[in-house]
Image: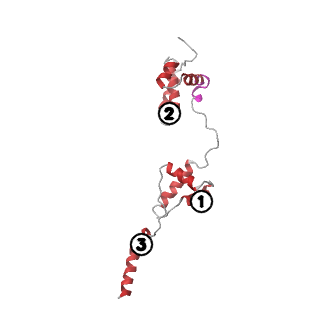
């Protein structure tokens, strides 16, 4: 039974479909759409494709129509509306690099200090709490500022001071 919701791919299009479906960076929704196109090319019906992929028949019809009208370019999601995020992945990586470099030196950073550094160096103004939440979401951890300086004590200077104190006490 022939309907208007079938796709016939050329050998070049089949190769392109295989290449796109096997790419690592393919989003799951795009992979499902590519599978809909492949199954339609195998002469599966819309209800059978929908049942196999556990989606609505109207979704399959929409994808098939879009592919027939625009080819592979019609399959990816459209860009999301709205303002792009102020704090990008590059900014977060710069902050993480700063913290990684500061750790061996024993330098401590607080969220407000990190936010100020980001504003100075990258011109990005964000709240300290927001920055800390984004870093936690990336599973990046840093130590809070310690209340003592004992961890920064130099053992050689302490031994020398102890020797001087012993001389003075006798």
Q: Residue at x 64, y 38 (%)?
A: 81
In 3D space, how far apart are the residues under numbered discs 3 and 2 (Cα atoms)?
55 Å
Expressed as whole percent of the image width and height from the top left, the position of residue 169 reads 37, 87
Secondary structure of the residue carrying numbered label 1: helix
Is 127 drawn above or below residue 21 in the view shown?
Answer: below
Location of residue 83 (image quadrant): top right
Residue 60 in magenta?
no
Expressed as whole percent of the image width and height from the top left, the position of residue 159 reads 37, 77
Is 79 drawn above or below residue 136 in the view shown?
Answer: above
Q: What residue did someone put label 2 on?
A: 28
Q: What residue did someone put label 3 on?
A: 154
Describe residue 87's horizontal placement relative to residue 102 as left or right: right
Residue 71 in magenta?
yes
Q: What residue did someone put label 1 on?
A: 116
In 3D space, how far apart are the residues under numbered discs 1 and 3 (Cα atoms)?
31 Å
Secondary structure of the residue carrying numbered label 2: helix
């Amino acid at each position: 039974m022939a309907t208007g919701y079938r796709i016939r791919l050329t050998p070049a299009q089949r190769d392109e479909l295989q290449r796109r479906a096997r790419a690592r960076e393919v989003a799951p929704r795009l992979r499902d759409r590519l599978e809909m196109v492949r199954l339609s090319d195998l002469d599966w019906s819309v209800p059978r494709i929908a049942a196999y992929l556990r989606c609505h028949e109207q979704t399959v019809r929409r994808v098939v129509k879009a592919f027939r009208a625009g080819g592979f370019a019609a399959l990816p999601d459209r860009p999301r509306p709205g303002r792009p995020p102020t704090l990008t992945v590059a900014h977060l990586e710069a902050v993480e690099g700063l913290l990684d470099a500061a750790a061996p030196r024993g330098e401590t950073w607080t969220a407000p200090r990190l936010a100020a550094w980001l504003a100075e160096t990258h011109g990005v103004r964000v709240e300290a709490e927001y920055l800390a939440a984004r870093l936690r979401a990336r599973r990046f951890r840093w130590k809070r500022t310690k209340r003592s300086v004992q961890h920064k004590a130099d053992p050689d200077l302490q031994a020398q001071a102890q020797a001087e104190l012993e001389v003075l006490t006798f």
